[in-house]
Image (spheres, helix red, strand yellow):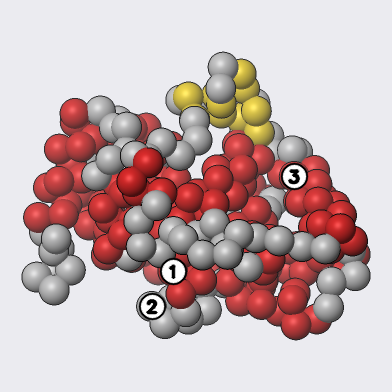
Amino acid sequence: MSSAAQVTGPRVPEEAAHAPGASGSRFRLTPREQQRFERAIAAIDAANSTDPNWVWSHGRERPKELVHSELASEWIEVLRPYASLELRLAARAHHIRRWEIPRTSFPEGQAGYHAWRRRLQEHHAEHAGILLASECYPEDTILRVQALIRKRGLGRDPEVQVLEDALCLIFLETQLAELATRTPRAKLVEILRSTLEKMSPRAVDISSSLSLSSRERELLDEAASKQAPERAR
């Protein structure tokens, strides 16, 4: 069992939670739909509870992907309280059983990395589909959840963008500190620049309010300065 730094939930100013894009009708389901939703979430959590990699969260060690799936749900609630059922399920299942396909199972380099990421998306979508089918969700719901997990339509589909924003914010909050200890500065700044490029303007604004160390903030600011002119804040 491996462990990592302390992981906490989203910490954003109140005004960010009420900014444009954060308002709308709250998520509501019928009692029967709510029960099925809760069963699906429990099944996803049960799968992620078997992750052999653990992190510190709220003073105790817990399975990494279980913690990260919970963080994704929390960020979705911040970014889009009126998010659809499909987006909420996709957020919870976005890394389901991720540890089963380690990075080392693919070649080093950019080509190997991208091949690994594509395989992971299929892996997560497949497992999410199996679990949702076991809860008798209709095919159109399952296909939509899988499309979101695969990030189909990124840059065009608002819900895919919300999920991408949530995942990028989780990365900045929970992985940047550790990554900074083992990654050359120039490469790390490029990773952060690429991350910012994938985020919506609102998510970039929220990132400026994250609880980061002074060094992490300096790296993020440097990455922001290297964005394309049309994306620079």
Label 2 secondary element: loop
Mark 2, residue position: 155
**Residue 176 placement: quadrant:** top left
Of 49 and 199, nearer the camera is: 199
Label 2 neighbour load within 10 Å: few <14, some 14-19, many 20+: some
Could you say where residue 150 lies in the image, as x and y percent from the top left?
57, 72
Instruction: State the mark number for residue 149.
Output: none
Could you say where residue 14 lies in the image, as x and y percent from the top left?
37, 41
Amino acid at dot 3: Asp
Label 1 secondary element: helix
Mark 1, residue position: 161
Q: Is residue 195 left or right of residue 149?
A: left
Vertical placement of 94 versus 8: above or below? below
Of 146 and 71, nearer the camera is: 71
Amino acid at dot 2: Gly
Q: Is residue 190 visible?
A: yes
Mark 3, residue position: 45
Vertical placement of 198 versus 186: above or below? below
